[in-house]
Image: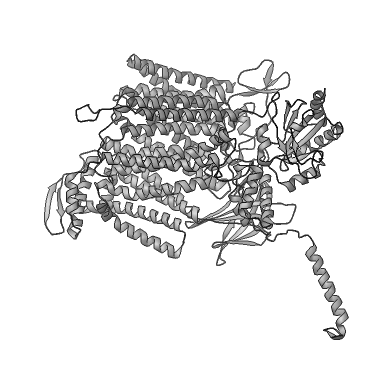
């Protein structure tokens, strides 16, 4: 009964979305504001409808309605309630409902904004947003229905169907299969929603871009309108990627955080174009340049979002991440075909009108450096895209299956990311109209010298690895230049306005939050880079089989095997838990670690949970690999010492701060008092000007 | 936004060669995705398909008629049971006894042959498995996964029944439940 | 010496010695059982090789990390091969022959696979060339500033003039923004 209601509501939502598209198109064609308004209201209706349906689904999940096929697939009696709720996005069908729910929420936010200006955009924003929502709803309604139930026919077969088959009665399994154990972890609660939020929120800037293309508006109004959307979309996507990495590190039990798995890359690609887009829209806003390029970037970002979703869900690529194969592949393929072809055709059609008078002061001007930034991001994109597509091509052409793995990606992207870091150091200086290498050098030499000094110090005390040292030099360089920018600006204000250092900083953030928030984000990126360098270059690893009271030494740690126990844990898993004593190289006792293997009988799967001891300097990470209770050969442990892991968390916090600042609404004009300004020159003369 | 004046360059659309490049690239990508999708949706070889030739180099001691290689084509005229298995595959153990006794039933006939194909396995463990379950019919490793790719197997165990004319007649995914089940499939093919 | 090196107790000592020697000979022949001592080659050496290979069955999982029974067998195989003195490339080649090119972390540099390695640098290079040419076409240097730059001599007052310009620009920007 409930399943039928839930499904029926989704059908209504689907029809409403289709109506919204049709009405918007019709209203635009006949220039009827009333019809467009009804389309807008229809779009507003979507979120409440989908929320109702989702609530039904969640209720079915939490109350063990195993006759519903989806509930049977992703929950079991032994799971705690909160995990049953998160099972909503634990499988293909439910996660499509979740996608639709998020998409409709953003559609409502767009519909609720003030539309008194830019009314000609409204129909097209509605069309693009509602088409996307309708597509995902359509997938749920027609292909992957979470409300389908099990029926037992009179012949004794079990079939899955939404509506009653002939001569069949509902079949009630005793228990469900349960959520994949890998997904039963707090990290799993946040990583997919965060990623989906990022994907979904990039649809809105895309919708405005298409609206601008269709209506022939070649100015940058659409960018101004979606500036904050883009920032938030980028925030969500970045966090989704960071959380995914952290979750992989904490839970998946292989001591790493990024495997260059095709599905990971599918989520990275829109982030790359999104970051490029974030930067180049600043140029368009200021100088009216790069209109064509920005259109291309946002179309590419949307295309990569849909493409990434397709890759993950269609079974075209096999990966540890991928959902099981299903019939949504062809549907997605059709959607990709239609959206790609339409967007590109539209862009080509409007191409001449987007042309602008591009004039740069120098090849080192801010605009030029931003373009270089874009080139580097696009280069990383090319490497990633080709690496993902090539195994497909190879299998089709030669029949040979190949793997494109980390060596390829690391080798290709490392110099590109290093160049980006170098650019992060140079570009802020270009904001002041610096146009020659000489003037640039004058501003940079102090930071370069100090960074070299720091690198030399690290060379002597910490490492001889050339690549790591280059990376550390770049990190130091960018940090120093960015801090220098803050200090220069603050000191200038102190000098001219007589403000204290902190008031000056406050004013900077208040008056120009985008630039200074952006600098904070750059600083956070460098903190994250410290983490990457640490775990990339300085990770130590060893594996050994120990008898009780034996120890492994690695780095500054000594790990002693003390005991092991097996017991039945909550939600029906068998836990094998080892107790290890940790000592430092001097023999001081540091604590205990408890790596364990959880065996889930219902899913017939093992989870290896590491024991971790985290400090700012490094992480001691221990895995229990094997223990055979029947024999007495001892237990096998793998020990990692991962330096600088917690700089990721530090970097993420700073990142959040930076985005909040950058997205902060600006103070109104005219609030600064008029003051007589005295400019002190070094030759002792003074002059005064008024603000 | 910018007006057309005498000093601005004439506004051109996208040059034709660029357009061609873009469309060719896009269509190419869609074609690749379509084919890839199609392939991933294909199941295993289906009854009615003709089975191509393959060569299997058996483990020593598990040859057929002391031949160094077992070639499918040379076995035309016999009813064949091709069984994909691996030593690390737990469900395979469930059907090992059934296969052994079914082979014992058919092996003296001369017109039925069981061939075991060991899927991505290691030889010592494979031999242990064969010895443990007393399997004697010809068996060999699937070098380079060529044979399993030809049959497009989705996992192990899977068993393929080929009639005397080289046509695939039955696909068993998963272990057999009984020896009778095997016989019920082979006997009609012997007519 | 006719009495043996230990004099009169030669016969007992030499019997003891003989028994000892025999015992050692037997012990050396006995199959070694692996106890909790480190097996040679070490786990780390096995993992180092396994790290560069991918599990032939599970997708995109490196061999040193993969927890399945099959992967455990393959790591044991690597251990045996290392003990027999196989080199790293020989082990890799064996895995490729047995299980296909899929087990390598990168496509082998043969035939069509060259495209993987060649195409991205080519495209990136094309991008660099395009960008460079566009930048050059778009750059219209501001004549007064370039002349001033050319005439400037590095000196202390220069730094101040620069910072004055900087301050002026900063205030300008902040005003424009609010």
Query: What quarter of the picture does the N terminus of chain A occupy?
Result: top right
Q: Residue furthest top?
A: A30
Q: How is the image coloured?
A: one colour
Numbered label tally = 0
Across and down, in percent, residue A260 comes to 52, 43
Q: Residue at x 60, y 35 (%)?
A: A399
Residue C161: percent from the left, percent from the top?
18, 54
User: In which quadrant will I find the C terminus of chain A?
Assistant: top left
> From this viewpoint, is residue A462 visible?
yes
Residue placed most toward the observer, B185 or A173? B185
Residue in the image at 72% along x and 18% along y = A154
- Where is residue A360, by image quadrant? top left
Query: Residue C172 at x, y = what percent?
Result: 20, 44
Residue C16 lies left or right of residue B151; in this view the side is right
- C109, above or below A322, in the image: below
Q: Is residue A623 visible?
A: no
Q: Is residue A587 left or right of residue C11?
A: left
The front one of A647 and A135 is A135
Q: Is residue C35 above or below residue B46?
A: below
* Residue A110 placement (x, y as % from top left): 38, 28
**Image quadrant where residue A81 sits:** top right
């Amino acid at each position: 009964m409930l399943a039928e209601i839930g499904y029926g509501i989704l059908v209504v939502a689907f029809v409403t979305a289709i109506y919204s598209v049709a009405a918007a198109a019709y209203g635009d064609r006949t220039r009827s504001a009333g019809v467009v308004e009804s389309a807008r209201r229809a779009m507003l209706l979507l979120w409440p409808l989908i929320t109702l349906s989702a609530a039904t689904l969640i209720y079915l999940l939490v109350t063990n309605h195993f006759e519903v096929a989806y509930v049977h697939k992703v929950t079991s009696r032994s799971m705690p309630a909160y995990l049953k709720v998160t099972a909503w996005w634990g499988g293909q069908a439910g996660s499509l409902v979740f996608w639709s729910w998020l998409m409709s929420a953003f559609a409502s936010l767009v519909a609720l904004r003030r539309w008194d200006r830019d009314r000609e955009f409204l129909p097209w924003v509605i069309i693009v947003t509602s088409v996307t929502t309708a597509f995902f709803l359509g997938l749920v309604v027609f292909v992957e229905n979470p409300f389908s139930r099990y029926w037992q026919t009179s012949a004794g077969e079990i079939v899955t169907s939404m509506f009653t088959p002939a001569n069949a009665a509902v079949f009630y399994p005793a228990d469900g299969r349960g959520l994949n154990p890998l997904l039963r972890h707090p990290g799993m609660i946040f990583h997919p929603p965060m990623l989906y939020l990022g994907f979904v929120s990039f649809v809105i800037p895309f919708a405005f871009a298409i609206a601008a293309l269709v209506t022939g508006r070649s100015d940058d109004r659409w960018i101004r309108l979606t500036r904050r959307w883009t920032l938030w979309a980028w925030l969500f996507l970045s966090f989704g990627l960071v959380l995914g990495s952290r979750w992989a590190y904490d839970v998946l039990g292989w001591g790493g955080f990024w495997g260059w798995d095709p599905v990971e890359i599918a989520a990275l690609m829109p982030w790359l174009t999104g970051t490029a887009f974030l930067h180049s829209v600043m140029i368009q806003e200021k100088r009216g340049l790069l209109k064509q390029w920005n259109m291309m970037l946002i179309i590419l970002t949307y295309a990569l979002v849909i493409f990434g979703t397709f890759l993950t869900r269609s079974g075209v690529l096999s990966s540890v991440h991928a959902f099981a194969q299903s019939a949504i592949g062809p549907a997605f393929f059709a959607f990709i075909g239609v959206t790609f072809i339409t967007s590109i055709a539209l862009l080509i059609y409007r191409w001449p009108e987007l042309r602008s008078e591009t004039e740069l002061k120098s090849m080192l001007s801010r605009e030029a450096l931003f373009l270089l930034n874009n080139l580097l991001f696009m280069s990383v994109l090319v490497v990633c895209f080709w690496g993902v597509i090539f195994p497909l091509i190879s299998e089709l052409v030669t029949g040979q299956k190949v793997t494109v793995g980390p060596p390829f990606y690391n080798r290709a992207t490392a110099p590109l990311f290093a160049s980006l870091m170098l650019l992060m150091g140079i570009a802020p200086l270009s904001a002041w109209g610096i146009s020659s290498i000489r003037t640039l050098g004058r501003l940079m030499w102090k930071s370069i010298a100090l960074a070299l000094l720091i690198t030399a110090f690290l060379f002597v005390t910490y490492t001889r690895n050339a690549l790591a040292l280059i990376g550390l030099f770049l990190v130091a360089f960018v940090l120093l230049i960015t801090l220098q920018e803050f200090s220069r600006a603050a000191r200038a204000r102190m000098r001219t306005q007589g403000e204290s250092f902190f008031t000056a900083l406050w004013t900077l953030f208040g008056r120009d939050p985008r630039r200074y928030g952006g600098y904070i984000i750059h600083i956070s990126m460098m903190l994250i880079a410290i983490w990457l360098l640490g775990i990339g270059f300085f990770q130590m690893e060893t594996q050994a089989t120990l008898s009780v009271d034996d120890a492994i030494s690695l780095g500054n740690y000594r790990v002693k095997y003390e005991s092991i126990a097996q017991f039945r844990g909550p939600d029906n898993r068998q836990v094998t838990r080892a107790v290890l004593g940790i000592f430092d190289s001097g023999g001081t006792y540091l604590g205990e670690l408890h790596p364990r293997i959880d065996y889930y009988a219902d899913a017939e799967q093992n989870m290896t949970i590491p024991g971790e001891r985290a400090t700012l300097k490094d992480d001691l990470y221990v895995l229990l690999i094997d223990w055979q209770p029947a024999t007495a050969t001892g237990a096998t442990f793998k020990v990692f010492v991962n330096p600088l892991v917690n700089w990721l968390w530090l970097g993420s916090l700073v990142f959040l701060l930076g985005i909040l600042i950058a997205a902060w609404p600006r103070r109104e004009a005219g609030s600064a008092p008029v003051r007589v300004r005295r400019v002190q020159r070094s030759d002792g003369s003074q002059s005064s000007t008024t603000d | 936004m910018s007006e057309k004046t005498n000093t601005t360059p004439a506004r051109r659309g996208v040059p034709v060669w660029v357009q061609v490049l873009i469309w060719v690239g896009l269509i190419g990508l869609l074609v690749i995705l379509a084919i890839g999708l199609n392939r991933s949706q294909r199941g295993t070889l289906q009854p009615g398909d003709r089975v191509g030739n393959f060569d299997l180099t058996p483990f020593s001691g598990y040859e057929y008629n002391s031949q160094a290689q077992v070639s499918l084509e040379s076995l035309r005229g016999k009813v064949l049971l091709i069984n994909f298995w691996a030593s690390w595959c737990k469900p395979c153990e469930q059907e090992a006894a059934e296969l052994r006794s079914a082979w014992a039933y058919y092996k003296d006939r001369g017109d039925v042959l069981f061939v075991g194909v060991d899927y991505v396995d290691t030889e010592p463990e494979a031999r242990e498995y064969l010895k443990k379950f007393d399997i004697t019919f010809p068996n060999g490793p699937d070098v380079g996964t060529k044979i399993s790719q030809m049959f497009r197997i989705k996992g192990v165990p899977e068993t393929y029944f080929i009639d005397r004319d080289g046509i695939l007649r039955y696909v068993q995914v998963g272990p057999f439940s009984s020896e009778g089940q095997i016989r019920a499939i082979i006997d009609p093919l012997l007519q | 010496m006719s009495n043996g090196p230990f004099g009169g107790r030669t016969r007992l000592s030499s019997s003891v010695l003989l028994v000892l020697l025999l015992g050692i000979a037997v012990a050396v022949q006995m199959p070694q059982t692996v106890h909790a001592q480190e097996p040679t080659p070490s786990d780390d050496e096995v993992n180092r090789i396994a790290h560069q290979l991918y599990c032939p069955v599970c997708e995109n999982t490196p061999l040193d990390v993969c927890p399945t029974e099959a992967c455990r067998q393959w790591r044991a195989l690597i251990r045996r091969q290392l003990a027999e003195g196989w080199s790293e490339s020989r082990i890799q080649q064996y895995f490729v022959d047995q299980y296909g090119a899929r087990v390598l972390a990168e496509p082998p540099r043969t035939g069509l696979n060259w495209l993987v390695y060649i195409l991205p640098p080519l495209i990136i290079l094309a991008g660099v060339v395009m960008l460079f040419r566009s930048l050059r076409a778009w750059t219209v240097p501001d004549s007064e500033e370039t002349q001033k730059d050319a005439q400037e001599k590095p000196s202390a007052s220069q730094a101040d003039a620069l910072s004055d310009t900087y301050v002026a620009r900063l205030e300008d920007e902040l005003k424009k923004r609010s």
